[in-house]
Image (cartoon, grey):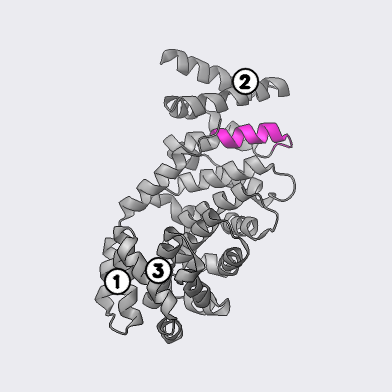
Amino acid sequence: MEVMHRTARSLVKKLGSVSEITRSEALAELRLMTKNDAESRLIIAEAGAIPYLAETLYSSSHDSQDNAAATLLNISISSRAPLMSTRGLLDAISHVLRHHATSSSPSAVQSSAATLYSLLVDDSYRPIIGAKRDIVYSLIEIIKRPNSPPRSIKDALKALFGIALFPLNRASLIDLGAVGALFSLVMKDGRVGIVEDTTAVIAQIAGCEESESEFLKFSGVKVLVDLLDVGTGSSERIKENTVGALLNLVRCGGGGVMREVKEMRPGAVEGIKDVMENGTAKGKSKGIALLKAVEGGAKKWDFAEVERSHSTRDVLLAMEGKLQKRVQG
């Protein structure tokens, strides 16, 4: 362990070198260390690497920017507090995301968005990150851009999902144009994984009072009903997310949403029943509550019961599981 401490201190010292070659070599070694050894991540953070890594996100060198962003992602999976306590870190991440279509490398954009998702596992950071409108705006722009790489879109969607988990962030997401961008993605992108992640974000944003008018503006209820229809061949996860979105709209919205939900065609009702029969435990409870709403028998306690069954622990476990797959080597 002492050897690891000495190695970390030596590499961090090299990050401050006047030699670009020395800095680049140190960055590559730190990236490899944080990929292969989870124990090294906190040690490297405590050795003072994070301010240097954040500064390197502004680099014009794509290799340096990539290595710095990947190392920050790897550290964040094990040690989030050192990142959030580093002054200027979120501004540096914002810089990478803001220039996603110009000077930032695609890999750095992806690692930066994934780092946000990692930080958002901690619910105390969600209001802080959600208040950074430049970050939220840039994430939305990434999913709106027609030629954004699929990996960039998926990582941006995961970050938006983490932001939307904090209820007070949802109105800001709506204000910055997230709803239109998300439904456009559902309509234009046929890749199942991306539609699954998109509907997960939609389901969260639906859970606020401001969602009704925005969803109606973009024919959101009709799009969700189409996804539920058994004839569309949506995956189980898409249908479960869609049930959650419609239930949140009914719970938070008014008569306009309820009318559209009650008018859904038989194929969509069959989709709800499919979730009730084959979905997860959470999905089944949401399906039951939504079907009651469609049939006109839902009461306020139905929705409250579903809310209590929506375990924060389940969400966190799912987020942690996805992060382990995003370690960057």
Residue placed under numbered mark 1 in the picture: 288
Q: Secondary structure at mark 1?
A: helix
Left/right placement of residue 63 relative to residue 128 reads: right
Amino acid type at image mark 3: Val
- Number of labels in the image equals 3
Which percent across, then down, holds residue 22? 68, 20
Amino acid type at image mark 2: Lys
Report if residue 167 is visible in the image: no
Q: How many angstroms separate mark 1 from mark 3 (CA)?
A: 10 Å
Which percent across, then down, holds residue 298? 29, 80
Q: How many angstroms separate mark 3 from mark 2 (CA)?
A: 52 Å
Residue drawn at x 58%, y 59% as measured from the top left: 133
Q: Secondary structure at mark 2?
A: helix
Above or below residue 2? Residue 109 is below
Residue placed under numbered mark 3 in the picture: 243
Q: How many angstroms separate mark 1 from mark 2 (CA)?
A: 59 Å
In magenta, the rendered stretch is: 59-71
* Nearer the observer, 245 or 8: 245
Name the magenta segment's main secondary structure: helix
Residue 110 position by quadrant: top right
Q: Is residue 63 magenta?
A: yes
Residue placed under numbered mark 2 in the picture: 14
Please identify, in this view, whether the residue under mark 1 or under mark 2 is nearer the observer: 1
Amino acid type at image mark 1: Ile
In the displayed orientation, state which residue is furthest to the front. Answer: 231
Dots 1 and 2: beta carbons under 8 Å?
Answer: no
Identify the mark nearer the N-term, 1 or 3: 3
* Nearer the observer, 293 or 168: 293
